[in-house]
Image: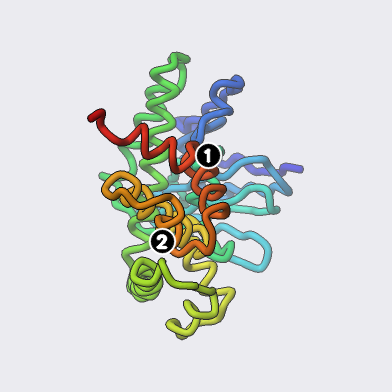
Amino acid sequence: MLTYNMDVEERSLWLRATPGAAVLAQPFYCTEAGHFYGRSRFATARTDKESYLLFYTVAGAGLIEQGAQQVELPAGSALLLNCRTPQSYCTAPGQQSWQHTWVHLDGAGVANLAETLLPQNRLTPVRVSAWEMQPLFDTIFAEWDRGTVAAQIETGLTLHRMLALMAARLLAGDASRSNRALIEQATGYIRAHYAEPLSLDALLAQTPVSKSWFLRLFRQYTGTTPYNFLLSTRITRAKELLVLTDFAVSEVAHQVGFGDESNFSTRFTAMVGQSPQQYRKSAMPPR
């Protein structure tokens, strides 16, 4: 259900599109975008919509509410909102206007970056300068009606740049620096001890936070779980040994921390797409 009061100036822009299957398969795509010059009574409330919504305030301020959360979005601030949960937004109380650019976007890439931009599903405004963000919106508006493959690619890349810019600003904050240092310590420990029997408890013993918070932070900063990070580290080292040494596959498995050759070969094949022997043959130059 959608209710709204479109109290906006006539020069406001609202663009709509119906993406085809090729666009919907992309990691970043958009279905609507606009530049609203909202007046004091501008307001929207929605129960659900199958997309994310990215706001950027140019002037004035907006008020965004979702569940028990309420945040104000002043000029120079961006916010990603998951519209699958009921939400409302309006010109902030006491403000005469809320001039903002926005885009409804979705895709696997968007969902992945949302884990950083919506930590613990908290609405998190991000400070971004207009000279960085506005040209990106201008690119989307310029490419909107072209309908070519090149335009679709450029739009997807631009959406990625927007979200990546926001994520970089968010992760550069003081609290984030502390969290990042904690995860860097954990990943450094994994890289140093990957050949040993490692457990989550061993990692947690190195950190002063709860298990749930550690796992959430780890995924936010690395994009994966500690176990998958360990597997990736082991397989990467195995690739080096397969190419640079004459070790038997069983010895390579032992060197990188696998208990038996069968488990190693199964994991290696699943992650690389080739068996260890096939990888060694394809990576080695002909004699």
Residue 40 placement (x, y as % from top left)? 53, 51
Q: Which residue has dot 2 on it?
A: 256
Identify the residue at image location x=64%, y=43%.
5
Q: From mark 1 to mark 2, how far is it between C-alphas?
A: 62 Å
- Vertical side of 160 occupied by 205: above or below: below
Residue 91, visible in the rendered structure: no
Crowding near pointer 2: few (<14 within 10 Å), some, many (20+)? many
Q: Are marks 1 and 2 in contact (CB under 8 Å)?
A: no
Quarter of the image that includes the N terminus: top right
Front position in the image: 131 or 85: 85
Q: Quadrant of residue 286?
A: top left
- x%, y% of residue 197? 49, 72
Q: Up-down: is 90 above or below 17?
A: below
If you read the primary sequence from the N terminus, does the residue marked by circle 1 or circle 2 appear first?
A: 1
Q: Nearer the viewer, residue 237 or 112?
A: 237
Residue at x 23% of width, y 30% of height: 287
Residue 201 horizontal/vertical position (percent): 54, 80
Per the image, the residue denoted by label 1 is 8
Left/right placement of residue 37 relative to residue 244 reads right
Seen in the picture, residue 62 relative to 144 is either above or below; the reply is: below
101, 18: nearer the viewer: 18
**Type of amino acid under label 1:** Val
217 up-or-down from 29: above or below = below
Residue type marked 2? Val
> At 54% across and 43% down in the image, what residue appears?
270
Indicate the secondary structure of the residue bearing disc 2: loop
